[in-house]
């Protein structure tokens, strides 16, 4: 869950953008909604469009033990890697990059999928933003994406990952960032999960990943009518295969929605 201060900032951004543009989330950048004259909000800065790390056919490092462990990348808030039990040498695992909401940390990222990773045999990489939220959300340079690329390279060097089952997921600001990273790196991420996104963080497009979006109809942090109800049709207009689940509730990921998303990812 995002902390109250970033949430208040997003409300102010929503209100300010509404006053300026009537229906856009962020002024100045966007993609045209079909037949509407409305711009789908995107952040001013793209996430680094060129993540270079890729799964290796024969990783050379030692297979990590089951459980959660930090990756030693020389940073204060290291990414966490969760290895499900039963991961065998030689067997390729599905990997999900899980992105926390504003004010969160890597532990919060691990909780994005509702604790279903072990049940479904998912390898989960949960980075932590360098600031209070992800750089592409605030328009800073791509240091978060650069660190993620390093983390992915380390994971791919030690764990056999199925290249056909690499996904990115996130909640709130993490969902906005997941959309940006996923659409910019569709040659790596075959699937993108966005729980309650605010916008698409970036404009780069590579490949055609499938997208799962969920949003609460009573979300008072990122109101659905100004966010997912515009994001989803715009993505569909661009040609993406989008699964959309709108539920009765607020700014959260209900357990049944998390379970549906994990089933959609094809884990297990």
Image (tube, helix red, strand yellow):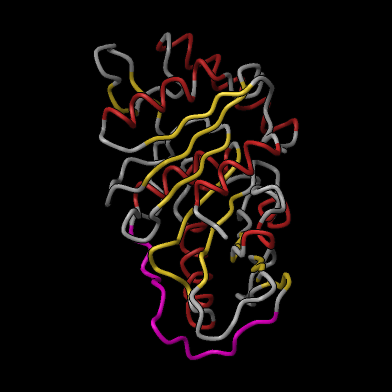
**Quadrant of the rendered image containing residue 28:** top left
Left or right: where 240 falls relative to 82: left
Toward the front, the furthest residue is 268
**Quadrant of the rendered image containing residue 242:** top left
Q: Position of residue 114 (x, y in %)?
A: 70, 47
Q: Position of residue 179 (x, y in %)?
A: 44, 42
Residue 179, above or below 14: below
Q: Nearer the viewer, residue 253 or 200?
A: 253
The residue that appears at 42% across and 8% down in the rendered structure is 22
Left or right: where 234 falls relative to 108: left
Left or right: where 49 falls relative to 245: left
Q: Bounds of the magenta span?
A: 50-65
Is 56 within the magenta? Answer: yes
Q: Quadrant of the C terminus?
A: bottom right
The residue that appears at 63% across and 75% down in the rendered structure is 74
Q: Position of residue 201 (x, y in %)?
A: 43, 40
**Quadrant of the rendered image containing residue 63:** bottom right
The residue that appears at 55% across and 24% down in the rendered structure is 246
Q: Nearer the viewer, residue 127 or 266?
A: 266
């Amino acid at each position: 869950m995002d902390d109250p201060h970033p949430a208040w900032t997003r409300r102010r951004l929503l209100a300010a953008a509404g006053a300026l543009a009537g229906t856009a989330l962020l002024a100045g950048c966007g993609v045209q909604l079909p037949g509407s004259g409305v711009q789908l909000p995107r952040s001013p800065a793209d996430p680094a469009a060129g993540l270079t790390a890729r799964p290796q056919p024969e990783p050379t490092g030692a297979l990590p033990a089951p459980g959660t462990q930090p990756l030693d990348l020389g940073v204060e808030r290291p990414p966490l890697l969760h290895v499900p039990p039963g991961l065998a040498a030689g067997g390729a695992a599905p990997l999900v990059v899980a992105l926390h909401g504003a004010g969160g940390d890597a532990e919060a990222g691990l909780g994005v999928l509702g604790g279903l990773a072990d049940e479904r045999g998912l390898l989960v990489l949960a980075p932590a933003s360098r600031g209070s939220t992800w750089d592409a959300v605030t328009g800073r340079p791509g240091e978060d994406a650069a660190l993620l690329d390093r983390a992915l390279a380390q994971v791919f060097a030690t764990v056999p990952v199925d290249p056909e089952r690499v996904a990115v997921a996130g909640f709130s600001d993490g969902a906005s960032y997941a959309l940006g990273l996923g659409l910019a790196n569709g040659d790596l991420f075959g699937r993108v999960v966005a729980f309650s996104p605010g916008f698409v963080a970036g404009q780069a497009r590579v490949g055609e990943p499938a997208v799962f979006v969920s949003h609460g109809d009573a979300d008072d942090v990122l109101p659905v009518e100004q966010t997912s109800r515009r994001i989803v049709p715009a993505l569909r207009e661009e040609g993406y295969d989008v699964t959309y689940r709108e539920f009765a509730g607020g700014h959260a990921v209900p357990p049944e929605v998390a379970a549906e998303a994990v089933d959609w990812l094809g884990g297990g």
